[in-house]
Amino acid sequence: MGLGFAVGVLGVLILGHAAYSTIQYRGLLKIMEEEFSGPPMNVVLELLLAFLFCIWAALSVPGKFLSINPDSEENRIVSLPDNLDFMIFNHRAKVSLSEIDLKLKH
């Protein structure tokens, strides 16, 4: 576990605390019979901080990219799927490509 993962967990915990604080605040307003006009400023700041932590963790936690071996048989798209019922080869692109070919020949 790296620093990015720990920051992500902290961001999620802060986000949960902000949600709990908002629910508690609304309950307090119901007891005092006041109208809910929005969350308190500390909850808004907690949400912004949690958002920044979660974004930072999402950008830093993923691992390194691995190169793709182009000669591998697993990466080939040449093989067709077993069910060919939904493969359509007569569509608009056939007509538009032939029009482009005609324009290029002239």
Image (cartoon, helix red, strand yellow):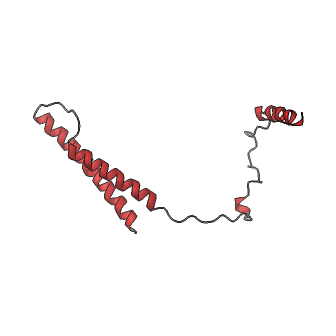
Identify the residue at horizontal 15%, vertical 34% (top origin): 30
- Using the image as rendered, state which of residue 98 and residue 83 is in the foreground: 98
Which percent across, then down, holds residue 74?
A: 70, 61
| Residue at the outermost left position | 32
The mark tally for this picture is 0
> Taking 106 as reference, is 84 left or right?
left
Identify the residue at horizontal 22%, vertical 42% (top origin): 23
5, above or below 33, in the image: below
Identify the residue at horizontal 87%, vertical 33% (top origin): 102
Which percent across, then down, holds residue 35?
A: 17, 30
| Residue at the outermost bottom position | 1
> Taking 87 as reference, is 99 left or right?
right
22, above or below 6, in the image: above
**Quadrant location, the N terminus:** bottom left
Identify the residue at horizontal 83%, vertical 32% (top origin): 99
32, above or below 14, in the image: above
